[in-house]
Image (cartoon, grey):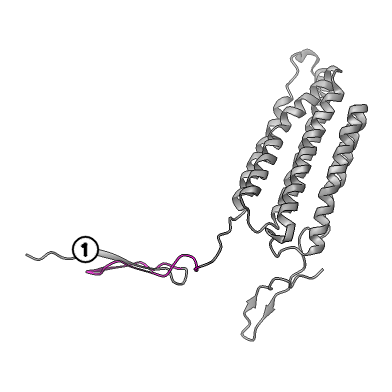
Amino acid sequence: MSVSSPSTLTVGYATGTADAVLRPGRRVVVTGSSRPAGEAFERDPKRVVAFSDAVIAIAVTLLVLEIRPPEDTRHLLHGLATLWPSYASYVITFLLIGQIWANHHVMFDHIRHVDRLILFLNTVLLMDIAFLPFAAAVLAKSFREGHGERTAVVLHALIFEMAAVLFNIIWWYARHDRRLLADTIDERGVRAITKRFGLALAWLGTGTVLGAVLPVLGVAVMVGFIVYYWLPISGELGGTRSWSTDGAGDSHRPKQGDATE
């Protein structure tokens, strides 16, 4: 009686692809490596962005839960009208969180990879954002009842001020010596984003101080912030890049430093 050898698998990784061939009587042979020797591992920021998008989406969704329908349906129109502080708080906070989301993408569009410190700072930023539905509810209730408006405006503004601080820290760390930046943005774009993020600190700080003195004025400063910060940042999309072709007509991506202002 003869016993046949089991079928085995031959695998190759040398060129980044895998070929699997079942051949009776053959042994398993593994060749090549999955990563060239000495190549540093870089953590792709896509998962950070995806997780951040999810948290931000939940935060803006929770905002509407604070708006409760009037209990007296016999005077429904009047009841709906008295909810104007909730509407105002909802719109202002939704648009401000939307700005956080947009600027988060502006920032991470140009971050090549993330390390543990970026992960930690981004987690703290998301914790701050997740607290905003509560701040929005406090703001609406204070104006609806006519008590505690100063405290509510300061609380609301301080949370956004903390978000601005974290944005500046993350961006500073990423751009310092271009340690984490990709080649998708030139120095002009880096300076433009830095300037815009820095201005947010002063703007939101001013709104916080004014809100402690005159709540309505503090809210007006925040509304102005919304209008200005939805404007695009010069150079946020990076430099213009051209494509070259060789004699065979094959296209080639531009190398680092090919960007033009």
The answer to whether residue 82 of the structure is visible from this angle is no
Q: Which residue is mark 1?
A: 6
Q: Which element is circle 1 on?
A: loop
Identify the residue at horizontal 58%, vertical 58% (top origin): 42
- For the magenta stretch, what is the residue range? 17-37
Say if 112 sits above or below 99 in the image: below
Position of residue 59 measured from the top left corner of the image (x, y, whole percent): 68, 35
Occupied quadrant, residue 101: top right
**Counting other residues with Cα less than 10 Å from the Cα at mark 1, is it few (<14), some (14-19), or many (20 or more)?**
few
Identify the residue at horizontal 76%, vertical 15% (top origin): 73
Occupied quadrant, residue 247: bottom right
Identify the residue at horizontal 65%, vertical 36% (top origin): 58
Number of numbered discs: 1
Amino acid identity at mark 1:
Pro
From the viewer's perspective, tell me whether residue 135 is left or right of residue 123.
right
> Which image quarter is the N terminus in?
bottom left
Does the magenta segment cover residue 31?
Answer: yes
Position of residue 172 measured from the top left corner of the image (x, y, whole percent): 75, 52
The answer to whether residue 68 of the structure is visible from this angle is yes
Position of residue 79 measured from the top left corner of the image (x, y, whole percent): 81, 18
Say if 224 sits above or below 12 in the image: above
Say if 61 sits above or below 111 in the image: above
Identify the residue at horizontal 89%, vertical 28% (top origin): 212
Look at the magenta stretch and give its main secondary structure: loop
Does the magenta segment cover residue 247?
Answer: no
Position of residue 214 measured from the top left corner of the image (x, y, whole percent): 93, 27
> Which image quarter is the C terminus in?
bottom right
Outermost residue to the bottom: 247
From the viewer's perspective, tell me whether residue 94 is left or right of residue 5.
right
